[in-house]
Image (cartoon, rainbow, N blue to C red):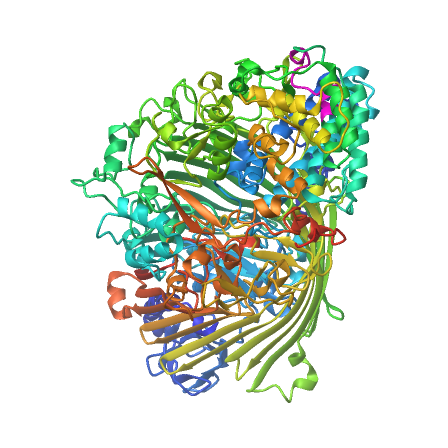
Amino acid sequence: MKHIFSSILIFILVAVSVTSCNEDLLDIEQQGVMGPSTYQTGDDTQVKQFISAVYALVLGDSYQSVLAGGQASYRSLQYEMARMSAESANYYVYQEGSDAGTYSYIWSYYYKIAYYCNMILEGLPENNVASEDVKSQVIAEARTIRAIAMMNLVQLYGNPPLADHVMDGSELNTPASESWAFIESELEAAANDLPTKPGLDGQAAIGGRLTKEAAYAYLGKAQLWQGKYSEAANTLHSKVIATGLYELNDNFATLNSSAVDFSAENIWEFNFSDDPSVATAQGGTFDIACYSPAVSVWYFKYASILLGFGLGSYPSADFATFLETHDGKDKTRYQETLMDYNTASMMGYVTLPIDECEGYIKVKDMCLAEDLVGDFPYYFNKRSVVYMRYAEVLLNYAEAVAMGGSEGAMSGLEALNLVRNRAGLEDAPALDMDNEEYGVKAERRAELYGEGHHFIDLVRWGDAPQVLADCGKQGVTFNGLKEDGSFDVVTSNTGGPGFKSGKNELFPIPTSDLNNNPELVQNPGW
Amino acid sequence: MKNHRNWAFLPMHGKTLRFLFALALCTLVTMSVFSQTRPISGMVTDSNGEPLPGVTVVVKETTIGITTDFEGNYLLQVPADAKILSFSFVGMKTQEIEIGSQTQINVVLEEETIGLDEVVAIGYGVQKKSNVTGAISSVKGEELASTLGSNAASAIQGRVSGVQVVNNSGAPGATPTLRVRGYSSNGSSDPLYIVDGLKVSDISYLEPSSIESMEVLKDAASAAIYGAEAGNGVILITTKSGSQGQTKVIVDAQWSFSNLANKVDLLDAEQYSQFYTEAFGDVFTSLYNEHYITGTDTDWQDEMYETGLMQKYNLSLQGGNKSGKFFISLGYMDNDGMVRLDRDYYKRFTGQINSSYNIKPWLEVGSNNTITSVNSSTLSENNVQYGMMKDIVLADPLTPVFYDSNNLPSRVQTVIANGLHPITSDDGNYYGYSWARDGLNPLAAVQTSNTANKTFSVNGMTYANIKPFKNFVFTSRLGYTLGNVANQEYNPTRWDGYFKDVDAPLVLKSQQVAARYYQWENFINYMLETEQAGNFSIMAGTSYINKEYNIVGAQTNELSSEEDNFVYLNYSTTSANDFVTGNLSYQRQIAYYGRLSWDYMNRYNVQANFRADSYDAAYLDLDHNWGYFPSLSAGWTFSNENFMENIKGNFFTYGKLRASYGINGSISNLGNYMYAATLRTGQYDLEGNTANMAYWLDDQLYRGTYPNSVLANPELRWERSKQQNYGLDLRFMNDRLSTTIEYYYKLTDGLLVQSVAPLVTGAETVFQNLGEVTNSGLELELTWKDKIGDFSYEVRGSFATVNNNVKKYRGEGIRIQGSRMLAASSYTTFFEEGYPLWYIRGYKLDGVDATTGAPVFADLTGEGEITEADRTDLGNAIPDYTYGLTLSASYKNFDVSIYGTGTSGNSMVYAMMSTAGNEQSNRPAFLYENRWTSSNSQASLPSPLYQMNDPRFYNSDAFVFDASFFKIKQIQLGYKLPKKLMDPIGMESVRAYVQLDNFFTFTDYPGSDPETNAYNSAMALDFGSYPIAKSVSFGFNITF
């Protein structure tokens, strides 16, 4: 009998155990993700979500880049560029190797942007669900942004692999000339499909998206960098300046305010919605916290957030001196760019030692009290982040002309003077590159301070080895005011060797990518 | 076994026998009326001629018996018709002597051949040790029992060759890391833990005294029955069960007092000020002049540590009869760590309930269950960025622990006046704040860190064995883990830095994790015994595993009050920024497995294992989710061969050769859909809750949709190890000397490399099966045991070499970056072909420029300048060899044991610092003593200026030290109260002991402990852990 019982029991258990091993049980769906085929199957809303991610990524998140580390943002890049060009008192010490995070994080920032764009560009053409006009605009935007990312890569890294497809890591160096050709043709092609700005105040209708004119403004910039001065002057004049769709805002002071969001000076901007229901759900929170002075300020004008990061908030004394000489302390542009400690202390700054400060505080780009939205830790500044201003277009054009490009209806000198006049300066007597008082170089340095241009400008002009020879050799700490009103700034040696000619003009290709692909050729000197 | 006989058993034998003797006496009295008796006397000795006291002498098949006296003599009245006398003694072979007409019978008892019939657990069954063909090491419960502390894993250290036990942390409740035969993976190399058949992720929930045995399956053939998860070795744990006729009550108690074992040699206030004056000049001195409180010179290590107390109590009950057995154990442990304030503790209740019952001759059922409840609080450690333990070493000596309440610095008065909240002690003293570095006073940090972890779990296995016919067993068993983990973390509103002008907001976090795990396994074991062809045994079965996690968490930054009774999420205000997390996840696994063994004439053994494993879509793409793991092993007991008969004798007693080959997998680094190409929407960082990928387009906010930062790789699979093992077991000199020698060669391929994706791809990480790692080594276990009169002793040594090498990655010079020091721009450890796993790569410091104090690095490439290419191999964390030595001895009522363990050839990076140029942390003395100054231009280390500012210095061998060590882990002295005192009070035995742990360490490493080690790629970096304590313990065991 026992055999029968136990055999039946075994039979039942075996039967149950075999059926329990149903392989379907292994198919556990991943939470919170979508499949890559969504590029082909997405509707209009989803297609806009694809490009929204690109726009959000371009600005990036300063919280991530500063606190969490590893992720670059638009602002953290501007900050690094200011350090490298000795415009920030946190001088870049030219001592890092090719495995340094600084270089790899800038590299990945641009390649990541290109990746997001390439995923759209490879997937979206096969999409038959979304409407044609939505698709076409998104594709043109992705092409433009990919070209801009590539332009930055070429400027900084020389001959990086061209991201004209979804990359797998096996790509070799692409000669810069080939990349430039790609950048130009892409911008040109994208411009055809992008909407034209519908009037001087028409940007609001397009919002924080790219226009045909923006693509051309970047095309002109690409041509200028390559030394194609005639093409640059022609593109910038005929496709941007002569359209009459842009003009400088009257007052330099208003640039810092959300009042000029979508103004006629903005070529391309990241737009924060003021709608309180979505305020904190947008990218770029914490930006103001990360890039405010690391001292207590609750001044009626500026809403500085008191978290003590202070990155990029202290201009170098050299720049402050330059601007005082070039513009004068009484000029709006000086006052809206920086203030010295004497001025600031009257507004309630506290006497504490501040590292990487030489007695000046950057106020350009500082959040105005009226523009602050949200509560800790989700503060943000509702002002648009402007990636390219008409002032830069005018200066690019002036430079192209000064370097031999042919003028259009507006002369190069006129373009320069538009910028000078708005800053409160007299007309320049002539169009010149190097003149310390009215040259294009000095004007760019003053006007575009902190906007991420100066380092590549110095390299482009060949001035970097001389200007940056001592960059980072000394570290500075601000110890407050002396009784006579001068600053007590103490310095220490860092042991840094300064900018090295023949090497530091280009960033190194990050070691991790060389490790991955030994066929990649490193830049000279690294 | 002989010298590890459980002394606790002896008195019981005595007592039982005394009872039997009394009974026998009565019987004799009554019987004498009817029958005659006659006396038999004699002496019992061991093979050396030494008398054996306490030997049981019984007339076979009666209850008539006696034990020998101290001189080994006995006198027994036996019935006239008695035929056979039986002589038995623990650890000796029982002898039966025909009485015949003899009146004097002297007997020489032979020592029982070691472990011949001992069985070892092998996974889904047991095997006679004599039939084992793989490399299995076994540690028995009695060895575990003497181990201090809460964790069974530490008992293996130095006792099993080829198993490295790394004590990462001395924190209460910390679990050591086990490495079986080196490091097979660039990720986790954790072994698989199986407790009574239940798969568990760690074994810290077990009370060590409830463990009957631990088996380490080291070679692939032994481990292959666990297939895809066995690549890093398998630890099988069997908990105790009762046994028939032995009813016992055991009480254990232990008290331990711990103190910091080793202080790190740091700078005092004067040296510190000198160092930073040289490094930063006015930047430092101007601060110093303004803020230094004259006379302050804090030794933080003295201030932070006090004597820790651990108490441990355990009550075990065991019993059984023909039908059933039970073992019940209740334990409580309270380990209050040695850091001041009550923020480091571990309190654990454990209940072990094991029982089995033969319901029918063909049906046995049973259940083993462990119920564990833990309350604990931990301090962060071993982290490159955050670590409260690291801060003890980094804190500057210029900061006072507390301010003088009558003389608060003006800065502190100002912030108080501004309504901020400087941290105070429970009795209202203001903690000192550091103006020299951007870090909290470490004691203040402990004060404001309030974590409470509460864990409750039931781990169990309930089974039925059905035996329909002889030698056939069908087992159906259900294993389960039901657990709940509740964590709460609270930091009050506090002023958290000397130069801050606002308070840091409070943080209250709470998280609950409910885990439900079950595994259902059905398998048969059948043994076929044949006369001609030997014995065959077959095992085959299925397994299904389902795991479910339910996580809910919430956080707030504002409470309606910060009084103690408001620190609950309920009192979060409406204006607070709250956020929530939650997830329900599953993991599933299906497996089929089988084993075939053959043994023939006790000479030849062959065993084959096979397992097919599959995992759910979270681990692997469903088109590639099955893995197949075969193995084969064989053994030859040549000492049983006929031709050995002449050789085998007193000197050589046993010899066996073994060889095995097998394939295992490791999935421990897989999971979470690493292979999948996916798109994400919205936030990409839930934890930080800040990075919203959204953009305002066309008057609407669109959440961004974008590719995952992980590059897809659908071909991803488990890591696979192929391992050969050759073993030789030998015993000599009547088994006094036994030795096992193993050689293994293990090749792990398809290493799961989580690397920085090629950055040009735009992704951040990629998981790939790339590269091969080999581990090979020689393992030697040697035991000598002997007994001279009342003195018995045992010497046991284990020794293992590990040769670890990345055999293949992607060609020469291509390396994966591993870990780095805090704020370092360059990495310290790398994964590269031709080198050991995560070796240290850096510059060689070649001296100091005598005029400037700048470091001079070796220009290995001879290019005339120092570049990346001048970095070189500076060592690695994997020891060349590890060893352990155990000495134990007993004399009459005393026993003593000493055990030590060591490693050699491993390096460690002193990484308890930040490389940030402005980080004015305290420094180890070696950086100060050997520094360049204008008056000491012949120094070996650069000037403080260059030490602080040249990033290459941190990547140089100046921070790499030989971390070889030898530690005497434990010295224990025990005394058993004389039996004469025990009997009247009804106790069987009382043993008291005193024990010293970690008192002696021999090493050149300047950090607090050479055993410290972080995980995976950071294993060569000492980020500052909770130091191992030295402790003095007292305890007793009572058996009723």
Q: Can residue B17 be seen from the camera position used here? A: no
Tell whether A444 sits left or right of A197: left
Given the current orientation, which residue lies at the most extreme front position?
Answer: A429
Prevailing SS of the magenta stretch: helix
Location of residue A195 (image quadrant): top right
Q: How many marks?
A: 0
Q: Quadrant of the N terminus of chain A?
A: top right
Vertical relation: A282 (above or below) B291: above
Tell whether B268 sits left or right of B1020: left
Given the current orientation, which residue lies at the most extreme left position?
Answer: B406
Vertical relation: A465 (above or below) B533: above
Residue toward you, B708 or B897: B708
* B547 within the magenta span: no
Location of residue B586 (image quadrant): top right
Vertical relation: B99 (above or below) B807: below
Q: Can residue B216 be seen from the camera position used here? A: yes
Q: Quadrant of the C terminus of chain A?
A: bottom right
The x and y percentages for residue A352 are 34, 37
Residue toward you, A16 or B831: B831
Tell whether A165 sits left or right of B883: right
The x and y percentages for residue B347 are 36, 46
Residue toward you, B376 or B894: B376
The x and y percentages for residue A268 are 66, 22
Q: Which residues fall within the magenta stretch?
A: A202-217
